[in-house]
Amino acid sequence: MIDTAAQSPAFVAGPTVVVTNASKWFGQKVAVSDISCSFGPGVTGLLGPNGAGKTTLLRMLTGLIGPSEGSVSVLDSDLREDPSGYRQVGLVPEEDAVYGGMTARQFIAYGSKLSGNPDPGAAAQRALAEVEMLDAADRQIGGFSKGMRQRTKVAAALANDPSILILDEPLNGTDPVQRAKLIGLFRQLGATGRTVIVSSHVLQEVERMTDRVLAMVDGKLAAAGDISAIRKAMTDIPYRVFIEVDDPRKLGSALVGEDVIDGITIDGGGLHAEAHDLAQLGTLLPRLSRDLDVRLTTFRPEDESLESVFRYLVRGRK
Amino acid sequence: MSDRGVVFDLGYVPYEGPRLGTAAAVRAEVRDGIRRVLGLRRKARKKILPWMLVGIALIPAIVFVGLAFLLSSFDPLGAGEDSPFGGHVDFFGLIGNVVLLFAALAGPELLVPDRTEGVLAVYSSRPMRPRDYLLGRTGALAIVLAGFLLVPQFLMYLGFAALDDAGFLRALAERSDDLVQIVLSSGVYMLAYGAPAILIATFARRTAPATGVYLALMLVLSGFAQGMVEGDVTGARFAALGALAQHPVVVTDWIFDHSTFGLAPVDAGWDPWVSLAIILLVTAVTAVVTIRRYRSLM
Amino acid sequence: MTAPIISTKGMSHAYGDIVALHDVTIDVPPGSIGLVGANGAGKTTLIKILLGILEPTVGSVDVLSVDVVKDPIPMRSNVGYMPEGSCLPLSQTAADFTVYAAELAGLPRRASRQRASDVLTLVGLHEERFRYMGEFSTGMKQRAMLAQAIVHDPSLVFLDEPTAGLDPEGREEMLELVGRLGSFGINVLTSSHVLTDIERTCDWVIMLDGGRVLRNGPLAGLTDTSTVEVEVLGDPVVVAEALTRAGATVETDHQTVFVEYPAGDTFVLVRDVLADTGIGMRRLGARSTSLEDIFLAQDLEPPS
């Protein structure tokens, strides 16, 4: 494969999944519009508002549907031409396929067998071990909590040891403990070399799984790459930071005088400052506050999070 | 004056007004139920079946009175006579099936969606108990069924009185016994056809199958029973008790001192009060079972 | 505390052999309350008991000063409920149903219409309110469900997973709305699995585990610590050593330094050390334990 790392952050070096000028329309509606990007080992987040085309893109990645234009290739083979590539892609769908009467082990082995695995029992055992569900493996799915059903679905997708794993809203309905465990599991799967693509609406949790995201808005790719790098690329939007200090006005006027900030708002016990270079501000502040003899208790960037970045991306499209 | 300006705070305004209790809630529920079964404030297609049935219910009444009017110009009705084409009791024979069909549609429509769409949770958080909720739903059904049964009959009553050679007002008074008979018979039909609909709707998971089960239960069982009685098969006597669709006809005949041909309970030799007893029994069972079920749901 | 809006004593509830709630004794003040716990910990059971939908096996329960076990009906005019999942009749319009929901709570007809109109605007349903709810997106449905829960201006509203299924924008808007309810004079009890949402909107937390109350107290009390954390832009080791020399207890984790200095003012010390070393800060604040940390520290095993 050509080393595309030198290109835009939408691409990775050594990719396992490559999307080239892919578009998909359903009648008049263009769900995916000329997207080019690639995914590689590790975890990548796929984000976007409802209707942005995420689900359509995911379905193209699994080969469930083909692009109207352009191509999707998995491990160097175009999925539509060479269907055996399917086996390398595991999908954990959002919907619950209800197999209440089966045990977890049975369900996973069954799915594995359907995909042509010669030893479904061993595959199921391995998958159950990987998601740490061996102790519950022989209980009926009907009695499972949401978190355990999710883990079962992940195990089912892992049974055939796919190098690419696609997760659609995998944390839906799981409780905090299950969530933390699943997040850890996904990170580990990424760390061991699998290509993990996670689509989720709960951005704080996506942030915990990965640094790399692709954001879609209205069928197009709106941003790609490292979250903080994306934020940095929004050069027209200064960073906002909250500074809590015992004398906001004193510090505020000094900051204005120092030419490090673009704007300032006094707010009760602190101030909100806008600056293009937070590092400069953060380096200046200790000395300045000591000189002024003010007590600094908080310095908190307010719009570096994935949530804020995402909001800026979507807002620009309104 | 020109220097002054005001910005109104359109923020949240708390509600300080009265909070009426359970009774008001149930009344609102009844109104909602009536709209639901008649398809009002809902998609157009939900109006089709109910209003078709309304039309079918009114037409015979209009026909009866209309024809009586035509004939009356030649031969006025004597006091106490009805149209030679049919009177109140014959009308029950016609409208009975319309009421059955309507109950088949309305019963499930009133109870099933609230469960399957999760709306019961909203009722559970309002000042009403399960029995209040059910009162509201069955009340809506009762009112609409009563409408089907009483309104056309009342129109006929007025029509016949107007055509009566004894004069309108006198005829109203002389025919007042008819009113009592109409009301009693209507009540019997409402219970006989309404209760099973509520019972089935309490357990059904979807509305269409519930309608089907109800119609099967009422019509098929009755047809079956009738067949058995006519064929004089063993056990026919007891099968006749299951002719749920026919019991109200038997009781209405009893009230009007009339005789309809081909009623299984009658042919099997049962007295009319047995039919009434069965209707009341089914109603009681429905009430008990339904309240129990909803106590566990709400 | 000022008169609690929720007060239970020795309340337990069992379904046959299974004990869903055990000896729950809590007093909860007005405000915005978060209810957290693993699946099966008893959250839904607790909410149902507070609403008077379920009667506890033993114990007393008072909501808004009404004995809910004896008779929940009087209290219901003043509470609202937004259940998990859907609770909307799909064949009705949002406008129609919201008016109905107000009437069911006992508002007279004219007031119902007025309130419904105002509340629908508040939750952000404009022309859509005249469409049948069967056609609504998830976001619109959540708004309609919130509308029916607050249309009658309740004193207390129960929200069960209010952000479930919403996209990031929808979540943001819902959380913002929930945050505003307090300013409307409406107390809120939110049950959610997304702990960061609770941290954002609530000032009091009830934590359940296996049917027992693990914590019941102000969020700040749960999460505040005396430790100061500072994420530095330069070499954390330099900063750590300087702080230690000054007598503070220090821990580091990548670029973050955690400082405890009971002998004096930790913030001032940190400020001075950074000023001296010329190392800048990326982030500074009192360390607060996240709800999740508390959760995981309990080593909670979700009953499955």
Image (tube, rainbow, N blue to C red):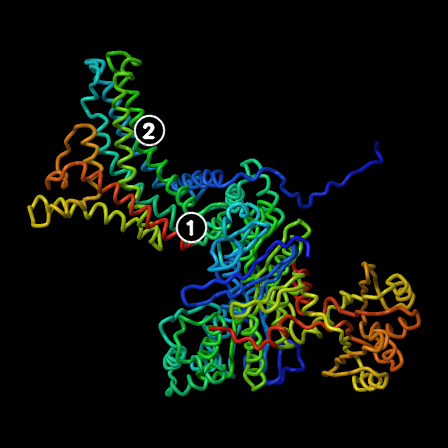
Asked if residue C204 lies left or right of residue C284, the reply is left
How far across and down, in percent of the image, does residue C147 sit?
Answer: 57, 49
Q: Nearer the viewer, residue C78 or C147?
A: C78
Residue B269 drawn at (x, y percent): 10, 39
The residue type indicated by label 1 comes to: Asp
Q: Separation of disc 2 and disc 1 at Cα?
A: 29 Å
Q: Which mark is residue A102?
A: none
Identify the chain of the residue marked 2, using the numbered disc in the image: B
Return the residue at label 2.
Answer: B151
> Where is residue A92 drawn, in percent x and y?
48, 74
Q: Secondary structure at mark 1?
A: helix
Q: Is residue B160 above or below residue C234?
A: above
Chain holding disc 1: B
- Coordinates of residue A220 in the picture (x, y in percent): 60, 66
Which sits earlier in the primary sequence, circle 2 or circle 1? Answer: 1
Marks 2 and 1 close (CB-CB < 8 Å): no
Residue furthest to the top: B166
Residue visible at 26% across and 26% down in the picture: B63
What residue does disc 1 label? Answer: B114
In the picture shown, does residue C238 fall above or below C209? below
Q: C246 and C88: which one is in front?
A: C246
Question: Which residue sits at x=52%, y=53%?
Answer: C51
**Which sits in the foreground, A204 or A92?**
A204
How packed mark 2 is, by other alpha carbons closer than 10 Å (few <14, some 14-19, many 20 or more), is some
Can residue C92 be spotted in the picture? yes
Q: Amino acid at mark 2?
A: Val
